[in-house]
Image (tube, rainbow, N blue to C red):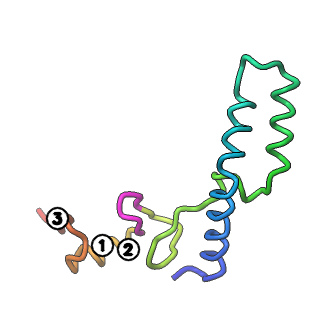
Amino acid sequence: MAKLSSVNKNERRKKLVKQYAGKFAALKAQADDKSLDDGERLIARLKMAELPRNANPTRVRNRCATTGRPRGFYRKFGLCRIELRDKGNKGLIPGLTKSSW
């Protein structure tokens, strides 16, 4: 089980990313637009830098839904490898069967 403070911090980041998503996307598009002159693009980059640091989507960490573990995460299931194996062996994940050969 991950530290509860780490899980809560990640949840706060998700909330901030959602709050600033529209503004961040607009500024990013403006900063990446090659048709604008360099001054306008620089101003867009500076405005992006003024946004809260945790509003950047790259700062959100994928975590297991049950344990909060940050590593060995499977996006399709939203679980870490350990929980995926436990729940798969118990038959709690539809369509997932234990393989043996």
* Badge number at residue 85: 1
Q: Are marks 1 and 2 in contact (CB under 8 Å)?
A: yes
Residue found farthest to the left:
101
Name the residue at 62% across, 60% down. Answer: 60
Q: Is residue 78 magenta?
A: yes
Residue 52 is one of the magenta-drawn residues: no
Q: Residue at x 66, y 80 (%)?
A: 5
Q: Position of residue 94 (x, y in %)?
A: 21, 68
Q: Residue at x 75, y 31 (%)?
A: 31
Q: Mark 2 is on which residue type?
A: Ile
Q: Does residue 54 sit above or below 35 in this rendering?
A: below
Q: Is residue 8 left or right of residue 101?
A: right
Left or right, residue 28 beside residue 60: right
Residue 38: where, in percent of width, then height? 84, 22
Q: Mark 1 is on which residue type?
A: Arg
Question: How many C-alpha atoms fall within 10 Å of the one at disc 1: few (<14), some, or many (≥20)?
Answer: some
Q: Which residue is mark 3?
A: 99
Residue 90: x %, y % from top left: 22, 80
Q: Which residues are magenta?
A: 74-79
Residue pointed to by mark 2: 82
Q: Residue 23: give x, y in percent of width and height.
A: 71, 45
